[in-house]
Amino acid sequence: MLVVCPHCNAANRVPSDRAGDDPVCGKCGAAILDGTPVALDESRFDRFVARSELPVVVDFWASWCGPCKRSFPWMGEMQKKYGDGGLTVVAINVDKKREDAAKFLAATPGAFTIVYDPAGSVASSYDVKGMPTSYLVDRAGRVVAVDSGFRDDAKAAWEARIKSALETR
Ligand SMILES: [Zn+2]
């Protein structure tokens, strides 16, 4: 799977079966899947998405969000299953305090890219109304699906949308 380093924005190719081995960035040497929240702004996020191998699942989450605890394992599953096919899952934390996000991640690790948007500028550019809200961005950079809340009965439909986005060239 292609993972954009949250520290320096370099794109790194990581075999999915090695995602659990704490891969480090080839450019800056920092851990890229350690769940370290990093600050970013809207323009940096646009570059981040542009450099990722689309499609991208963009998920906004917060430490105080109950359904987010259930969406994390599912997003990890999607990253693992479809990462080699080109899917990138990016979870954007909107907590104002970084330690709140760290506590959540200690209890609920996420094996995908996690970035930090404490000012909410990326969230407002996506017009996020509640937590969690997920977007599916296709290879052309278009938002092709959006859903708020996390419901188990919506998983199959999301997976079908992801598959279709991967198959669309
Ligand atoms: Zn890096």
Image (spheres, rainbow, N blue to C red):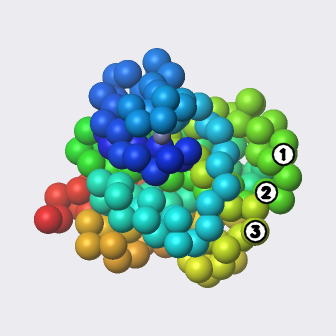
| Residue 116, disc | none
Secondary-structure class at tag 2: loop
> Assess mark 3: CB under 8 A from ligand 1?
no
First of labels 2, 3 by sequence position = 2
Judged left or right of residue 141, residue 112 is: right
Do tag 3 and tag 1 residues touch (Cβ < 8 Å)? Answer: no
The amino acid on which the numbered mark 1 sits, given as a three-letter code, is Asp
- Provide the residue designation for mark 2: 95
Q: Residue furthest left?
A: 169
User: Residue visible at 50% across and 52% down?
Assistant: 90
> Assess mark 2: CB under 8 A from ligand 1?
no
Cα separation, mark 3 vs mark 1, equals 15 Å
Q: Against 15, is 43 above or below? A: below
Do tag 2 and tag 1 residues touch (Cβ < 8 Å)? Answer: yes
Judged left or right of residue 168, residue 152 is: right
- Provide the residue designation for mark 1: 100
Q: Quadrant of residue 25?
A: top left
User: Residue visible at 60% across and 51% down?
Assistant: 115
Q: Nearer the viewer, mark 3 or mark 1?
A: 3
